[in-house]
Image (tube, grey):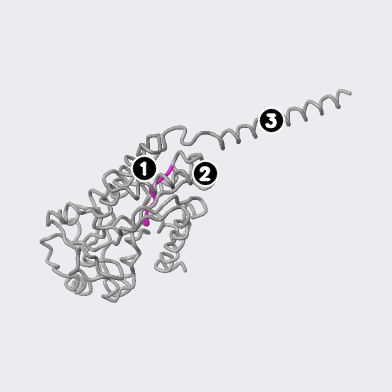
Amino acid sequence: MAQGMANKLFAGAAIALGTIVATAATGVAQEKFPARPVEFIVPWGPGGGADQLARLVGKLAEPAFGQAMPVVNVAGATGGTGMAKLLAAPADGHSMAVYIADSHALLAGANPRWTLADIVPVAVMIQGPSFIFVAENSPHKTWADFEKAAKANPGTLKVATLGFGSVDDYSLKALEGNGVKINQVPFAKPSERYVSILGGHADALYEQAGDVAQFIKSNQIRPLMIFGKERHPAFKDIPSSHELGYKVALPQFRSIVVRAGTPPDRIAALSSALAQVAGSPDFKKFLEEQYASADSYIDASKAGAYLAAQLEDMKVLAGSK
């Protein structure tokens, strides 16, 4: 009798617990979105291109979204520290991160800390090429000058980059495979990297034109080569890597991602807000100032395929495929 009563009590408790769990899950799914500010994680320090993107997107999206989008800079490990923060947050759409090509390149290396299955790209916001820049007073007036010096004295020319295992790293290794051996000097802080060639801490800089636009416009630095299949309209006299025989053209992209498992309706809501941002005059002006492609924006329905294709190209350059 006592055993039967215990079984009934246990069964009742199990049903009650199941009801509570189901109700909680339903509550999360039906919770108004966004119910609170959406944390915008930037896995890099302040002042860089990813930081600029987040702050502009947040500013333009907040009015239509109805919630603030505070930017949180979490620098370290080529974006890995910031990504760890995103993946530790609940998959409820209230945390998202700027995800750029350099962080994506880590997936082409050994033992990546996350995979494509761990994230969902909500949109690709910027696509643009990278360049090799030198200071205006550099003795290397053309890419031919730089190439000649690098081949004559392998490893002596220093190139400032974001870090090893990044798009910068893979692109420069492609040059080394063609005899242009340089000494890569990583700078974690964007501001320090940008001015490294002005202070003589590096001979050249691997960077996107938009991130150093102020130095280009003030005639402090100039490009020697663009990584791409074609020349850039703003720099018609600067040769592309492909025309010089270097078959590497990894674009620098900046996307926005959330944690995998985020409800589809919330991903759709975020994607819709970002589409409005991408179509705004302010964002189009931003793309122009960044020397980026006018048709950079890719929505959530196609962004995943884009990231997958980029990863395949990176794996080829990394020698992991």
As for residue 206 lying within the magenta part, the answer is no
Asked whether disc 1 touches disc 3, contact meaning CB atoms under 8 Å apart, the reply is no
Q: Quickly name the residue at label 1.
A: 74
| Residue 210 screen position, x and y as percent | 24, 54
Measure the alpha-carbon separation of dots 2 and 1.
27 Å
Disc 2 element: helix
The range drawn in magenta is 96-102
In percent of width and height, residue 237 lies at 17, 69
Q: Please name the residue that numbered disc 3 is placed on.
A: 17
| Residue 45, placed above or below residue 115 | above
Q: x, y (%) of residue 62?
A: 36, 38
Q: Is the residue marked by circle 3 packed among few (<14), some (14-19), or many (20+) residues within 10 Å?
A: few
Circles 2, 1 touching at the beta carbon (< 8 Å)? no
User: Secondary structure under badge 1?
Assistant: loop
Instruction: Give the image location of residue 242, x and y in percent.
Output: 30, 73
Picture quadrant where residue 106 is located: bottom left
Alpha carbon separation for disc pair 1 and 3: 38 Å
Residue type pointed to by label 3? Leu
